Image (tube, rainbow, N blue to C red):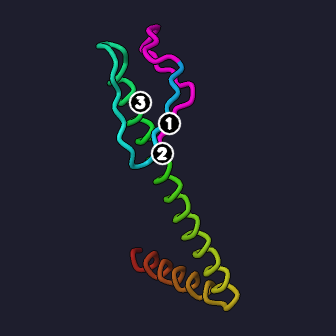
Amino acid sequence: MIVFDDVHVSFGKLEVLRGINLEIETGSKTVIIAPSGSGKSTLLQAIKTAEDIMAIYFLTALLYYLLNVTFSTLARRSKENASKGLGQIIIASATKKRLQRETSVK
């Protein structure tokens, strides 16, 4: 469904669409008939821009959700590993390897 409620579109000081109210049901066919220069193409461009913005919003929300789930899962697993002593072993092992590298370089 597409709903425009009091939409205004301007190019600089020139207001091309003034207070457009429009409701198009999903799956319906709509014909826009108006004189040349009345803003038909601008209206279609506004609909396309609104769709693009919604797609970006949806993808951003999805990405945020996936990252949040991933980070919360990693944090939970990290806490679980630390409580089992696994985190300390990994850190100690990494530190030992780093120390071995530093001493072998000299």
Q: Which residues are magenta?
A: 1-18
Q: Earlier in the sequence, mark 2 or mark 1?
A: 2
Disc 2, disc 3: CB below 8 Å?
Answer: no
Q: Which residue is mark 1?
A: 23
Main secondary structure found in the magenta portion: strand
Q: Which residue is mark 2?
A: 1
Q: Whole-percent x and y of residue 1?
A: 48, 45
Asked if residue 14 is among those painted magenta in the image, a careful observer would answer yes
Q: Earlier in the sequence, mark 2 or mark 3?
A: 2
User: Between residues 12 and 99, which one lies in front from this camera angle?
Assistant: 12
Disc 2, disc 1: CB below 8 Å?
Answer: yes
Question: Hey, which quadrant is residue 30 in on the image?
Answer: top left
Q: Amino acid at mark 2?
A: Met
Name the residue at the bottom extreme.
84
Q: Whole-percent x and y of residue 70?
A: 54, 70
Query: Circle 3 sits in a helix, a strand or a loop, which is it?
Result: helix
**In the rendering, which numbered label is found on residue 46?**
3
Query: How far is the residue under mark 2 from the one under mark 3?
Result: 14 Å
Front tag of 1 and 3: 1
User: Between residues 19 and 81, which one lies in front from this camera angle?
Assistant: 19
Q: Amino acid at mark 3?
A: Ala
Query: How far is the residue under mark 2 from the one under mark 1?
Result: 7 Å
Residue at 43% x, 48% y is 26
Q: Whole-percent x and y of residue 81?
A: 63, 86
Residue at 51% x, 21% y is 8
